[in-house]
Amino acid sequence: MTTYKLNNLNLSKFEEQAAIPKYNRSNIKTGIVHVGIGGFHRAHEAFYTDQLLHDETVTDWGICGVALLDFDIKIYNTLKEQNGLYTLVVKELDGSLSKRIIGSIVECLYAPENPSAVIEKMASPEVKIITLTITEGGYNYNEATGEFDFDNPLIQHDLENPKAPKTIFGYLTQALKLRKENGLKGLTVQSCDNIQGNGDMTKKMLLSYIEKAEPELVPWMEANVSFPNAMVDRITPATSQADILNLIETTGIDDAWPVVCEPFKQWIIEDDFISGRPAWEKVGVQFVEDVVPFEKMKLQLLNAGHSVLGILGALMGYDTIDEAANNNDVNRFLRDYMRQEVAPILSDLNGVDLEAYEASLLERFGNIYIKDQIDRICSESSAKFPIFVLPTVNAQLKQEGHFEHAAFVVAAWAIYSLGVDETGKALLVKDAMKSTLKEKAIASKNNPVAFLEIEAIFGALKDSQSFVDSYVTAYHNITKYGVEKCILNINGNILNHI
């Protein structure tokens, strides 16, 4: 099969192999700046926007993708060479592949190369929305104090070098300052990350930074910038070399970095856009007055479920999430965790069938064609556990309820942090707090509670004797018997002995 490099020049050659943009991309103006042009953004917001540009006669909502960090150079170069185009490959439950070339990213910028260009783009009159996928750890939030972490060396750099920032807070601050100086209207900052109250979190963290960096900007920001909360959902595993080769071999599309994802997608947003927004509701986005109940459901069921499968699966020697999800005992453990510990603390979910939602999650996790890598799911667990798992623990402790499954997973995480699975194979632990996790994991061999002493993650959880007792029991049982034997017993009754 003849192959062609994916770019504007060759786009028409792929019309029979994939759905392609039918709109004139040269007429599309940038109305959105998106920071963090990784796989999830390209499977989610960029997909919805592409569909809108295709279905409706709109030209002012193209996306400028910003690669923020030094190691984002690869995705920047790829998209630049491909004129912002990439292939979205949907792995259906029956194993078939749906292919679509996405054209909504019409500009790309590499922040480390030209910080002023990014600031000026964010401050340009046609930009109405800045969206973010900067991962949970990108919000610079200290779990123990609940406040902005000014000790972060990158934040210190931004305070000292405001015109050449390295963090999203430095860029947003300078862009908003420039908008104010130019007499422009404000805009909306829209988080697309898996954080409960992600809009509220973004506002709180940015406000904290601005109060120190540019205090005179605070009143203008409060009056001219909105931060809607949102819930996002679409499983998007890392693209493998096999995915790239399969695309070339079956379609002739030479795409250096396609995106693969599941068919399911969801985006629920509070309708609070101060300078206008795309009509995303026409392509399946749901706008609501209060997104909190929905995001709480998703974070503590889907995202926590991923972490449960990831940590337990990693120790058991699995490589992908579907392998763990299709282990009957792991599957039952997760189902019981969702029903016994998470579901009882969820409320205000009018019209939502929780049991049906849980069943759909187990089906999605078990999709054998997605092959989501466990080391991707386990990466940055120090930022994920406080958001996905610990709110369930704290809510259950408050009402003297059940938290034994969660305690078991935390104990498994402590053992996982030693960096070796149960067969002796080295684990790829990717975490900003890796050294601290390893240090406390080693100390936990003699005193399991040492792991709970990481205050930035667990807060005061070590002071809860009931949780500590459950956690320590689980730690000793996993160490002695291994995960699989433990969960085989825990599925009958929570294990206090074997």
Image (cartoon, helix red, strand yellow):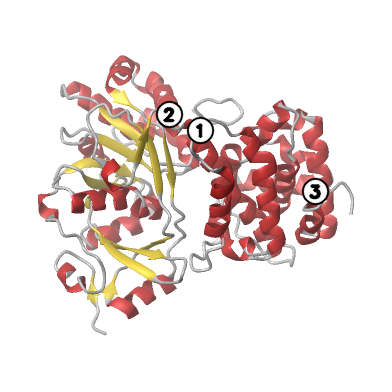
| CB contact under 8 Å: marks 2 and 1 | yes
Name the disc covering residue 475, or none. Answer: 3
Q: Quadrant of the N terminus?
A: bottom left
407 vs 9, nearest the viewer: 407
Q: Which one is in front in this view, the residue at disc 3 or the one at disc 2?
A: 2
425 vs 300: above or below: below
Q: What amino acid type should be assigned to the residue bearing mark 2?
A: Asp
Q: Amino acid at mark 1?
A: Pro
Q: Secondary structure at mark 2?
A: loop
Q: Residues within 10 Å of mark 1 (few under 14, many from 20)?
A: some
Examine the rendering and report whether any part of residue 167 can be seen.
no
Residue bearing mark 1: 293
* Residue lying at 50% horizontally and 33% vertically, measured from the top left: 293
Q: Give the amino acid at mark 3.
A: Tyr
436 left or right of 171 in image:
right
The label number, if any, that marks residue 290 in the structure image = 2
Q: CA distance from mark 3 to mark 2?
A: 39 Å
Q: Is residue 285 above or below residue 79?
A: above
**SS at circle 3:** helix
Determine crowd level at label 3: few under 14, some 14-19, many 20+ residues with C-alpha closer than 10 A. Answer: many
Q: From the viewer's perspective, is 447 left or right of 328?
A: right
Pick the front one: 368 or 210 = 368
